Image (cartoon, rainbow, N blue to C red):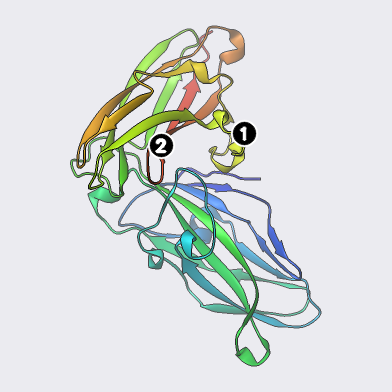
Amino acid sequence: MKKTFLIFGIAFLSGSLCATSLKVSPGGFIIQNVKPGVIYNLYETTKIKLSIFNDDDTTHTYAFSMHKPSEVGRWEKGYLEIPDPAWCWFKEKEVTIGPQKVGYGDLSFKIPDKACYYNQHWVATMGIIGKQEGGIGLGLGIYVRIQIETESRSDIEERPDGLIGFKPGTIELDGAAPGSSHTKKVTIFNNDAKSHNYSVHYLREDEKLKASSYLTHSYELIPDSSWIATDRKSFKIEPGGNLTLSVTITVPPGMSHDNKKWEEILFIEPDAGLPGFIRVRINTSDKG
């Protein structure tokens, strides 16, 4: 199960990942509201330990490493690869764990203090790889994806990093009374050297995607995507250009909609290349 934690937000994608005698917990997580320029330590910030379980009957040494996800496999739709995996590091590069024992990884990370690194949705992949006997070669291993979302801000003048960028990265509606409508705006940037046609899609439209891989902890997927409407479903942005998209959120009346926490993911998909997304978060009031 995935869990998010607002910072800092951390969401665990699964309880653990297993590979024969090796198990790692959590098996992945989302870290939200990360402020560029600040050093975060996973345990000190969240009190969550990255636990490595050696279920074998012999002692093993496991090496830690950080990667771009394309180096080791797939990753979640809408997230872009972290520009530099070295922004995440371990205090110790390896851990030795006795038979039927548990060890821990001490993970920290820091996004450089640049305005273009706000409003980002990135993925980094950490490897926990067993060393062969005698320390020669590598053996059993597990790769854990970390979804990193930097602080969402609309007052940044610099263009966001990446071929596709957003300002802000999250639309948040607080204290929305059931029966009300609200319009928010987000600017979408085409930082590619060529023009692209884009289309808007909702998380629930793709049956292959798991909502638990995206939702913030304690939030539910919005009951009906028709509550969220954009002023256009498709559009074109020239190279180096941008477009402002209007997003209208309507919460139907009814006591059942009081004091709710909902989210929807709006994927912005180009005709070529990787998509990005806008996180839409709704917190309703108790005014039925």
Answer left or right for 68 relative to 61.
left
Q: Is residue 116 above or below residue 268?
A: below
Count of numbered tags: 2
Q: Position of residue 227 (x, y in %)?
A: 49, 16
Answer left or right for 224 relative to 272.
right
Name the secondary structure under disc 2.
Answer: strand
At label 1, the amino acid type is Glu
Of the 4 image quadrants, the one containing the C terminus is: top right
Q: Is residue 36 above or below residue 198?
A: below
* Marks 1 & 2, CB-CB < 8 Å contact: no
Q: Position of residue 231 (x, y in %)?
A: 34, 18
The residue indicated by pointer 1 is 207
Name the secondary structure under disc 1.
Answer: loop
Q: Nearer the viewer, residue 193 or 145?
A: 193
Q: Position of residue 192 (x, y in %)?
A: 26, 46
Residue 269 disc label:
2
Q: Is residue 197 visible?
A: yes
Distance from the alpha carbon under mark 1 to that under mark 2? 16 Å
Q: Identify the residue at image location x=23%, y=34%.
A: 242
Q: Nearer the viewer, residue 116 or 25?
A: 116
Q: Is residue 71 above or below residue 227?
A: below
Q: Nearer the viewer, residue 170 or 188?
A: 188
Q: Nearer the viewer, residue 244 or 24?
A: 244
Mark 1 or mark 2, which has the lower sequence index? 1
At label 2, the amino acid type is Glu
